[in-house]
């Protein structure tokens, strides 16, 4: 919006309340409508609201990228995959949008949870006459994982053995290397064994086989699929977040973060971080909207990392404030800092409850001009 209007970013305030579900498209494709409204408002000097008709929205807004893929795969007599070659053709639509980043993640996930010593993976982002496809749950990962799972299923069919036998034999172990050089820290084998134990997979398979042997019209199937998914942005500098925590002099607390609540529970987690560090009643804490005047330079709420990043930022801020409040208490009560504790809304000195509640401590800090 700043670029289109040719004004500095500090003249634009964006306030985002919680969204009704996050499936990727909000990461990039809402920009068009925001800029159109800003442009109209800028010239008309009036508020502007625009709502797409639902059918218009469905036609214009890009979805998950369809892919076409080819593969070759080879394994030895011990059923270990020794070589894998694959080519991905990504239907990007008429403009790049987030397609290059989606394509990168496809390559990162092309071997899923398996160790393959020899890999050649190639991806092409194809321009087509469709609306640009965009971010969607998994962000290219599912498309990469699907192909190697299809390859394993094909091998299993040829060898007349269950696909799960090949899957289990090739699971990643800690210290193994991904095709692009990252060293794995893996719990794949432990996860597989725990699932087999929890769900009694052998019995389930026997039940399916028995049913299929006795039923002509209906058949059942069962499949296992391990998942290896990279958390965080592939563009490293985007892995950052920020928070602003205010403790008001009546003891109430306001928290603003760079994350957007969209049903994933982010606000609840931030609330839990603040209340657990301050050890106060959750009713004292308000989680505010995401606002560019309170929090600048936000990364998108995406990459399954917003709770981790913004939660950690909130923890750092709350701990800094808590340290100041404890110092105020130590000075007031003429005691060592190490003997001060805040627990369940009350101040404790040497593990003994005082008559000071949290709000009195907040007022004492304000009187002493402590931020």
Image (tube, grey):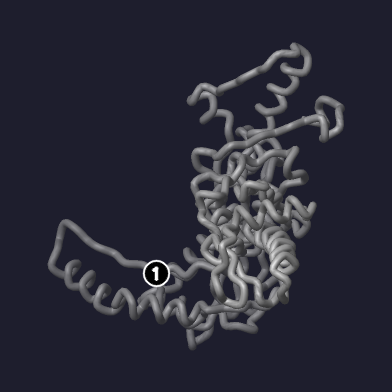
195 relative to 323, above or below: below
Residue at left 54%, top 28%?
57
Residue at left 41%, top 81%?
193
215 relative to 268, above or below: below
Badge 1 marks a residue whose secondary structure is loop
- Image quarter hosting the N terminus: top right
On screen, residue 123 versus residue 12, left or right, reads left
**From this viewpoint, is residue 197 visible?**
yes
Q: Quadrant of residue 364?
A: bottom right
In front of the other: 133 or 305: 305
In front of the other: 263 or 22: 263
Q: Position of residue 262 (x, y in %)?
A: 53, 44
Q: Mark 1: few, some, or many residues within 10 Å (few <14, many ≥20)? A: few
Q: Position of residue 112 (x, y in %)?
A: 55, 68
160 relative to 19, above or below: below
On screen, residue 124 versus residue 115, left or right, reads right
Residue at left 36%, top 78%?
196
The residue sitting at the left extreme is: 214
The residue sitting at the bottom extreme is: 78
**From this viewpoint, is residue 142 visible?**
no
Q: Position of residue 96 (x, y in %)?
A: 71, 41
Q: Position of residue 365 (x, y in %)?
A: 72, 55
* Label 1 sits on residue: 224
In front of the other: 69 or 170: 170
On screen, residue 223 versus residue 29, left or right, reads left
On screen, residue 166 versus residue 297, left or right, reads left
Residue at left 50%, top 38%?
20
The total of numbered circles placed on residues is 1
């Amino acid at each position: 919006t700043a670029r289109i209007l040719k004004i500095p970013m500090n003249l634009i305030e964006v306030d985002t309340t919680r969204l009704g579900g996050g499936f990727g498209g909000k990461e990039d494709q809402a920009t068009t409508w925001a800029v159109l409204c800003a442009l109209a408002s800028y010239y008309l000097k009036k508020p502007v609201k625009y709502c797409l008709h639902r059918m218009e929205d469905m036609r214009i807004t890009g979805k998950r990228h369809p892919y076409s893929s080819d593969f070759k795969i080879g394994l030895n007599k011990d059923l270990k995959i020794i070589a894998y070659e694959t080519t991905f053709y990504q239907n990007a639509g008429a403009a790049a949008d987030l397609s290059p980043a989606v394509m990168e993640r496809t390559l990162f996930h092309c071997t899923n949870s398996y160790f393959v010593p020899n890999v050649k993976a190639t991806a092409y982002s194809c321009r087509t006459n469709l609306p640009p496809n965009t971010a969607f749950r998994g962000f290219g990962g599912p498309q990469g994982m699907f192909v190697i799972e299809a390859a394993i299923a094909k091998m299993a069919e040829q060898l007349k053995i269950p696909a799960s036998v090949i899957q289990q034999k090739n699971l990643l172990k800690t210290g193994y290397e991904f095709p692009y050089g990252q060293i794995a820290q893996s719990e794949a084998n432990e996860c597989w064994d725990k699932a087999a134990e929890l769900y009694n997979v052998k019995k389930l398979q026997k039940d399916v086989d028995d049913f299929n042997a006795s039923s002509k019209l209906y058949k059942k199937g069962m499949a296992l699929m391990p998942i290896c998914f990279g958390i965080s942005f592939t563009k490293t500098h985007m892995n950052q977040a920020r928070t602003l925590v205010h403790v008001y002099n009546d003891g109430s607390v306001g928290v603003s973060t760079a994350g957007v609540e969209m049903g994933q529970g982010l606000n609840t987690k931030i609330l839990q971080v603040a209340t657990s560090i301050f050890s106060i009643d959750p009713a004292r804490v308000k989680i505010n909207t995401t606002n560019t005047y309170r929090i600048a330079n936000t990364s998108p709420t995406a990459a399954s990392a917003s709770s981790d990043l913004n939660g950690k930022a909130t923890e750092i801020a709350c701990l800094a404030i808590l340290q100041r409040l404890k110092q105020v208490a130590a000075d007031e009560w003429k005691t060592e800092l190490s003997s001060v504790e805040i627990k369940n809304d009350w101040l404790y000195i040497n593990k003994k409850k005082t008559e000071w509640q949290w709000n009195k401590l907040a007022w004492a800090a304000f009187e002493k001009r402590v931020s």
